[in-house]
Image: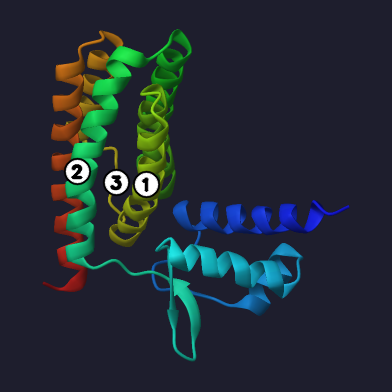
Amino acid sequence: MFERPTLIREEVYSHLRDAIVGGEFSPGERLGEVELTARLGVSRTPIREAIQRLTQEGLLENLPGRGARIRVVSAAEARDAYVVRETLDGLAAELAATQHTDADALALTTALAALEAAPGNDYREQTRLDLSFHRAIAQAAHNAALLDLSRDLEQRVALVKHQTRTYNAHPQTTQQHHAILKAVLARDADAARDAARTHVRTFSELVMGNLEVGSGT
């Protein structure tokens, strides 16, 4: 009897978060409470609470008199996110190399195969599957603190990717994904860490280049 309101709030929050991270909304797009209420078939209270949470998490920003919109990431913020991601992804791959189970190995292999099968011109699907592959690495590390940090960083990276529309199906990054997977499965922690850090540096250069072009700098 008393669980349903909480369930609704969590469902609305999760739905909106997944939609934002999944690129269903464009950077800078306004999220109107009335429109979301009609779309999700709920009252305005869980919508407001979800918007507040997502704003606190950095996915949305509130504009005085205009409501909430998908946050537009600056070049400096994007650069900071990738600096942290290089270290965090390196650690995740290093731990995954020593801690992964047979089930993790299958999940990683499946995730990479799905990414490579994504349509070459569908950046949203590529982004979704790329995030899934990197999430699988973090999960294979079996470190709760790292997984929490990775989730927060994933949201920031998703915003940047959708803003720049950077494709993941790049020959160099594809080779790097395989290098990460190979090292993890071989339980070579040093090679896994180095491969992951190299990959993040490479992709961050692509993203930053696109971000600067888009901003006209």
Give left or right: position of 173 versus 105: left
Point out which mark residue 177 bears: none
- Judge whether residue 119 can be spotted in this image: no
Question: Counting other residues with Cα less than 10 Å from the Cα at mark 1, is it few (<14), some (14-19), or many (20 or more)?
Answer: some
Q: Nearer the viewer, mark 2 or mark 1?
A: 1
Element assignment for label 2: helix
Q: Quadrant of the image for the C terminus?
A: bottom left
Q: Residue at x 29, y 46 (%)?
A: 167
Q: Amino acid at mark 3?
A: Tyr
Separation (CA) of disc 2 from disc 3 = 10 Å
Closer to the chain start, of discs 1 and 3, is 1
Give left or right: position of 42 versus 175: right
Question: Counting other residues with Cα less than 10 Å from the Cα at mark 2, is it few (<14), some (14-19), or many (20 or more)?
Answer: some
Q: Residue at x 29, y 22 (%)?
A: 95
State which quadrant residue 160 falls in.
Answer: bottom left
State which quadrant residue 63 falls in.
Answer: bottom left
Give left or right: position of 192 versus 48: left
Q: Amino acid at mark 1?
A: Glu
Q: Which residue is mark 2?
A: 203
Q: Position of residue 177 (x, y in %)?
A: 26, 27
Q: Which residue is mark 1?
A: 154
Closer to the chain start, of discs 2 and 1, is 1
For this rendering, which residue is in front, 49 or 111?
49
Question: Counting other residues with Cα less than 10 Å from the Cα at mark 3, is it few (<14), some (14-19), or many (20 or more)?
Answer: many
Q: Position of residue 190 (x, y in %)?
A: 15, 18
For this rendering, which residue is in front, 196 or 22?
196
Q: Position of residue 127 (x, y in %)?
A: 38, 44
Q: Which residue is mark 3?
A: 167
